[in-house]
Amino acid sequence: MSRNESIVARIIKMIIAIIIAIYVLFPFALVVINSCKQTADITADPIGFKGVSFTQLISNLKGVITNTHFSFWSAFGFSALITVCSLILLAMFGGMAAWVICRNKTWWSRVIYFVFIASMIIPFQVVMLPLISTFRETGKFIGIKMLQSVPGLVFAYLGFGGAMTVFILNGFIKGIPIALEESASIDGCSPERVFFNIIFPLLKPVITTVSILNGMWIWNDYLLPSLMLGQNGAVKTLPVAVQAFVGSYVKEWNMILAAALLAIVPMIILFIIAQKQIMDGMIEGAVKG
């Protein structure tokens, strides 16, 4: 009887997993299917396969890439630059902050750590207006343009992504034997050399995981870039450029969906390639933490 119950339980779990997968993948499937159609076919049957053609997909993608209203390569370049710079700074400063917080068993290190954790539960909508005004006034004070610029947006991502980065890295660092650092210090290594020569290389698996998770968030983020860069500025990320493109082609759904597909595909490819590293980093961090 228990064996039959086990088989039934597994079948139920499989059915639930399939339903969840269909629910999650259905919107993406609609984007892919309708990117292969003309606007008339999309309007007539948005969930059907009538009019689906690989040739039409190539035509739609070429039309989007060469369209002057979209500026695909410019938006792609800005998204890549912002994402890469943000990930480098998050890995570097997040690792250093997590190491210092973890190794200093003082009241102030615990307070700072809990401040990082507390910041993760604050909705972005609460801070977005004070953020814009603060960046505007700070830019005037230091003489650097913080709004509508790549450095300002990268700095914002460093702040918003730092909490999760420190939280995950801190759990991993707890599992690194402190004897390694003590031996290096006895041999004459400065704290900087201890971190960069010993700790930072050991963080590679979990940094890879955190970077991929942060990278998918930064690449796909729309709200923060739209607030800081604006809709009509020279600097646009792909989500902002797609939104501006929608305003130009309200009725050309084949072009709009092809533009959305171009913005989505790079992160999907990255996730498929790096999913093993994501799982390995999560498991290793959980075991060490």
Image (tube, rainbow, N blue to C red):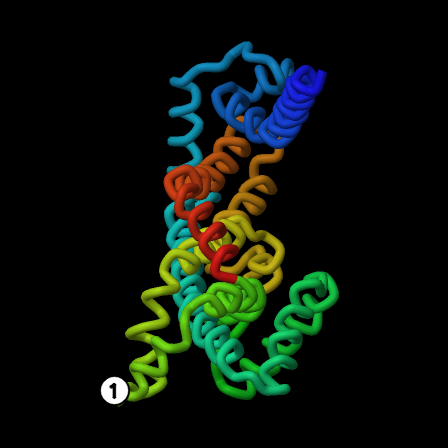
Question: In the image, residue 181 lies at what x, y percent?
Answer: 36, 79
Is there any visible trace of residue 174 in the rendered image? yes
Amino acid type, callout 1: Asp
Which residue is the site of mark 1?
187
Screen quadrant of the N terminus: top right
- Spot the residue most to the top: 50
Q: Nearer the viewer, residue 183 or 119?
A: 183
Is there any visible trace of residue 236 in the rendered image? no
Q: Residue at x 49, y 56 (%)?
A: 287
Q: Is residue 131 above or below residue 18?
A: below
Question: In the image, residue 121 lies at what x, y percent?
Answer: 70, 63
Q: Residue at x 68, y 62 (%)?
A: 124
Question: In the image, residue 256 lies at what x, y percent?
Answer: 54, 34
Q: Residue at x 44, y 76 (%)?
A: 96
Question: In the image, residue 153 lies at what x, y percent?
Answer: 51, 66
Q: Nearer the viewer, residue 84 or 140?
A: 84
Q: Residue at x 36, y 71 (%)?
A: 199
Q: Is residue 288 above or below residue 22?
A: below
- Give residue 207's quadrant in the image: bottom left
